[in-house]
Image (tube, rainbow, N blue to C red):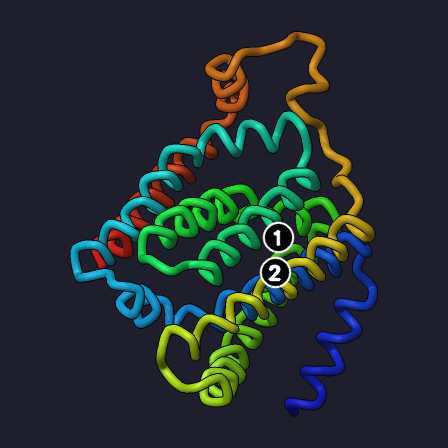
């Protein structure tokens, strides 16, 4: 039964457009590379001298930047396309890994958190946008679920490899964890090359292509005109996300 599911998944992926496969590979690679260090980030920060308050400030800095740029980033992507923002996101998250790898003080980690937050916002909706553009209507939900499933599998494998590498590099110390960030940098470099060489800009109408040049606020008015369902969807999404924000 598992074999049949794998075969069907391979057939499904094989018949999709290249953009979908590239987006799926990027999403899975990002999950894997993030999973390498996620369970060690707090230990690493404490080893660099951070206390509980400073740990919270690192997280808060990233969250604040993420909230601040969320809406403008979506607007910019709609105007100018997703590929260049994908590439910028990969470069930024690799830069965040460099700050962590080079850190000799916990303050370096604040900049790393800010870069990671910006990168997450720049690329967070990419898989859904590419799926919507590259996959037929009847396959879109399946495509998004396959993309998420493979990313989850990559996220499961990553901590196992990370544990082995940390053990080899000297255990759960700053110097034992630091090489993981160098592995991340190399991995993000490969992902950057994949996206730069293989991803094609999704063919969809952009706000920048409209004859009337709208402003930031006017663009949002245009977006909501005649789309009652969009407002309800945003309200429901906000309410369902509220309990998660309390953790």
Identify the residue shown where x is 82% and y is 51%. 197
Q: Which residue lies furthest to the top in this view?
A: 212
Query: The C terminus is located in which quarter?
Result: bottom left
Please identify, in this view, whether the residue under mark 1 or under mark 2 is nearer the observer: 2
Q: Pick whichever, 178 or 18, lies toward us.
A: 178
Query: Judging from the image, what secondary structure is the residue with disc 1 in?
Result: helix
Identify the residue shown where x is 70% and y is 82%. 6
Which numbered circle lies on residue 127? Answer: 1
Which numbered circle lies on residue 27? Answer: 2
Picture layout, residue 12 above or below residue 89: below
Q: Pick whichever, 237 or 115, lies toward us.
A: 115
Q: In whole angstroms, how far apart are the C-alphas of marks 1 and 2?
A: 7 Å
Q: Are the two marked residues, 1 and 2, in contact with CB atoms closer than 8 angstroms?
A: yes
Q: Where is residue 13 in the image (x, y as percent from the top left)?
A: 76, 67
Left or right of residue 157: residue 86: right
Q: Pick whichever, 35 or 166, lies toward us.
A: 166
């Amino acid at each position: 039964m598992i074999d049949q599911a794998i075969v069907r998944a391979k057939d499904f992926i094989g018949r999709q457009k290249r953009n979908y496969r590239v987006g799926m590979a990027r999403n899975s690679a990002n999950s894997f590379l993030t999973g390498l260090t996620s369970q060690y980030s707090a230990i690493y920060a404490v080893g660099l001298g951070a206390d509980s308050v400073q740990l919270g400030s690192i997280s808060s800095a990233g969250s604040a930047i993420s909230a601040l740029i969320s809406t403008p980033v979506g607007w910019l992507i709609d105007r100018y396309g997703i590929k260049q923002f994908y590439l910028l996101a990969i470069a930024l998250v690799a830069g965040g890994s460099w700050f962590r790898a080079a850190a000799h003080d916990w303050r370096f980690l604040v900049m790393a958190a800010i870069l990671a937050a910006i990168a997450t916002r720049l690329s967070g909706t990419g898989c859904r946008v590419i799926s919507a553009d590259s996959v037929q209507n009847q396959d879109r939900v399946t495509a998004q679920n396959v993309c998420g499933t493979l990313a989850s599998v990559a996220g499961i494998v990553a901590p196992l490899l990370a544990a082995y590498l940390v053990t080899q590099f000297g255990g759960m110390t700053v110097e034992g964890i630091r090489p993981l960030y160098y592995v991340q940098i190399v991995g993000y470099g490969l992902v950057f090359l994949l996206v730069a060489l293989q991803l094609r800009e999704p063919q969809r109408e952009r706000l920048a292509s409209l004859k009337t040049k709208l402003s930031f606020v006017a663009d949002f008015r245009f977006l909501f005109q005649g789309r009652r369902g969009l407002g309800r969807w945003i309200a429901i999404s906000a309410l369902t996300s509220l309990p998660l924000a309390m953790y």
